[in-house]
Amino acid sequence: MSDVHVLTTGEAARYCGVNFRTVIRWIERGQLKAYKLPGRGDHRICVDDFVGFLRDNAMPVPAELGAATRKILLVADSPELVAARQLLQQAGGEVDVAGDSFSAGALLATAKPAMLVLDTNLEGVNGFQILDAIRSRSEFASLSVLVVAPQGETNQQRWLDAGADAVVAAACDRNELVGRINLLLDA
């Protein structure tokens, strides 16, 4: 996995095959999120923001940058879901597991995952509150959320309305879960 976390305007331009001034115009127009360094005022672009920009504009994502967007936070304690970790890692994902909402919050802030897999069967977790908290914060705007619905849940639409990108049943097959995660990460 690449250790690159930020790009210069020149590096972003090379990935896009454009002049660095074009990248600066994208930044100035608000199309590409970036920050300015103190002093000369050079721009730096976070890799996650750049990859999001490329995807939003139907541009190809370089393999070395795409790998950075395969971080997954699995909030679960059931053996079946935790066992899915190995399958996700084999599919090229970098997976962190949190067994409670406190650990999940800490990992969301530090690991900056591209996807959250939320097991709503977890003891002491209110999935709707977590979705509301995530969707109300701009730094998680690009975070994909897959909800593992509670046992016996028949109305999956309410999870989608609450902010989930996809919902799977708690009793789903591990391969189905991994397939759904890969679809969301590659979207």
Image (cartoon, rainbow, N blue to C red):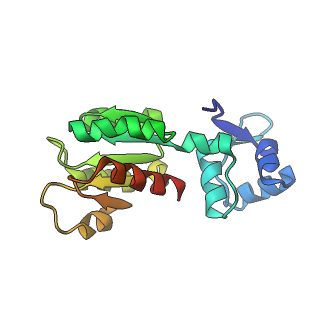
Name the residue nearer the viewer: 93 or 176: 176
What is the quadrant of residue 101 in the picture? top left
Q: Position of residue 70 (x, y in %)?
A: 51, 43
Q: Is residue 89 above or below residue 35?
A: above
Residue 113, x across and y down, in percent:
46, 41
Asked whether, in this view, residue 25 is left or right of residue 52, the answer is right
The image shows residue 15, relative to residue 112, as above or below, that is below
The residue drawn where x is 41% and y is 53% is 179
Quadrant for the N terminus in the image:
top right
Residue displayed at 46% across by 34% down: 111
Q: How many marks?
A: 0
Residue 106, compared with residue 26, is above or below; it is: above
Give left or right: position of 80 versus 181. Answer: left
Residue found farthest to the top: 3
Q: Is residue 57 left or right of residue 85?
A: right
Frontmost residue, 132 versus 63: 63
Residue at x 64%, y 56% (from the top left corner): 53
Residue 164 visible from this viewpoint: no
Q: Is residue 37 visible?
A: yes
Q: Residue at x 83, y 53 (%)?
A: 17
User: Where is residue 32 drawn, in percent x and y?
Assistant: 67, 55
The quarter holding residue 156 reads bottom left
Q: Is residue 55 left or right of residue 23?
A: left
Q: Which of 81 and 119 lies nearest the eye of the viewer?
A: 81
As drawn, 114 above or below 56: above
